[in-house]
């Protein structure tokens, strides 16, 4: 489930709790039923609607919600004779508030909120009834239910945090596995390339040696045969030189803008006049950006040389390549 879908689901749950709790409380206040909420209807309506609205913040501020619910329930309970049992909806509101403290608070806040909230409930709600000789068994049962819901909330929170840690660990392991797989593929390709290079180099070397030997075995003029064997020898030597150059490039570090001088010198030797101008102080770049900038310049020079060909300064304007220091605004962008 995505984050937005999870947030929408939580919002609908909050609305459902508020509507169900508030609607059932209003029904118990205004309908003539045996187990309704006794007392002044307008006062009870205000108090229970206030408790219902507090549950909108049960996830963001669960400890504050618990304290406010205890305060509201204490006001509601003290509107009646102390021996009288508090309404059923007051007990439900306290249960939900204790559960939310354990479910949505960190360990320290959950412990603080649970202890202080239970102490306040005992002093403000139960103590007046206890002093009026209400049986203690009623208090003990209520306290036990509050503690059970608080512990259940803490257990669910720990389970959720552990599940999140396991998901993060699984994602990290998946990334590492993919990275190792890519590394293994790269290493295998490098190994195959090295083996292929060795095989080709050996074969071409044998071809060059055999071409030299064949030239020595020829008798008489046989100019065409000697020319063909010489061409084979020359081509083989060029192939060996090219393979050694490719190997050197493969083992060399990735180029960057610091190698522009060498790149431009190679282009000049090919016959294309290039001018390099540096404005400001060069700054170090991230490796990926540095390599990309070098490749862009290399591609531009290659395409220019390919399409324009060698040129003399009098015949072709020089390529002006400028590298300047970026301004602070550009660096921020």
Image: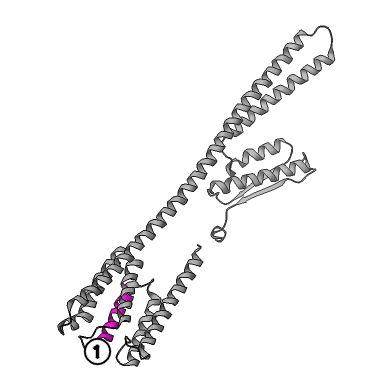
What is the quadrant of the C terminus in the image?
A: bottom right
Which residue bears the numbered disc 1?
80
Give the image location of residue 168, x and y in percent. 44, 54
Q: Is residue 162 covered in magenta?
A: no
Name the image quarter holding residue 85.
bottom left
Q: Is residue 74 covered in magenta?
A: yes
Name the image quarter holding residue 199.
top right
Between 191 and 52, the one lying in front of the other is 52
Between 248 and 108, the one lying in front of the other is 108
Between 242 and 198, the one lying in front of the other is 198
The residue at the point 71 percent across, 18 percent down is 207
Please indicate whether residue 211 sits to the left or right of residue 276 in the image.
Answer: right
Residue 42 drawn above or below residue 95: below
Residue 60 drawn above or below residue 20: above
Residue 275 drawn above or below residue 201: below
Magenta stretch prevailing secondary structure: helix
Give the image location of residue 225, x and y in percent. 82, 14
Between 299 and 195, the one lying in front of the other is 195
The residue at the point 56 percent across, 34 percent down is 188
Give the image location of residue 250, x and y in percent. 60, 34
For the magenta stretch, what is the residue range?
Answer: 63-77
């Amino acid at each position: 489930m995505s984050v937005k879908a999870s947030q929408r689901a939580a919002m609908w749950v909050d609305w459902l709790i508020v509507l169900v709790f508030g609607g059932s409380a209003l029904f118990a206040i205004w309908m003539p039923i045996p187990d309704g909420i006794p007392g002044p209807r307008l006062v009870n309506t205000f108090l229970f609607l206030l408790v219902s609205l507090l549950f909108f913040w049960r996830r963001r501020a669960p400890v504050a919600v618990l304290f406010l619910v205890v305060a509201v329930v204490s006001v509601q309970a003290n509107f009646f004779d102390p021996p009288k049992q508090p309404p059923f909806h007051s007990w439900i509101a306290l249960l939900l508030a204790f559960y939310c403290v354990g479910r949505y608070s960190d360990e320290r806040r959950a412990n603080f909120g649970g202890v202080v909230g239970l102490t306040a409930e005992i002093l403000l709600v139960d103590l007046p009834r206890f002093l009026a000789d209400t049986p203690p068994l009623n208090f003990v049962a209520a306290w036990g239910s509050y503690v059970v819901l608080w512990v259940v909330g803490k257990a669910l929170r720990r389970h959720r945090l552990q599940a999140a840690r396991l998901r993060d660990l699984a994602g990290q392991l998946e990334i590492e596995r993919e990275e190792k797989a890519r590394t293994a593929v790269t290493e295998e390709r490098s190994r195959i390339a090295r083996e292929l290079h060795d095989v080709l180099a050996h074969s071409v070397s044998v071809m060059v040696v055999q071409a030299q030997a064949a030239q020595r075995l020829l008798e008489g003029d046989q100019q065409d045969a000697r020319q063909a064997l010489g061409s084979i020898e020359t081509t083989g030597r060029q192939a060996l030189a090219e393979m050694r150059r490719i190997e050197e490039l493969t083992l060399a570090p990735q180029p960057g803008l610091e190698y522009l001088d060498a790149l431009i010198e190679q282009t000049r030797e090919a016959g294309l006049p290039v001018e390099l101008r540096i404005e400001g102080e060069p700054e170090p770049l991230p490796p990926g950006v540095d390599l990309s900038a070098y490749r862009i310049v290399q591609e531009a020079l290659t395409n220019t040389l390919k399409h324009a060909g060698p040129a003399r300064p009098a015949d072709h304007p020089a390529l002006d390549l400028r590298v300047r220091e970026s301004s602070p605004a550009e660096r921020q962008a």
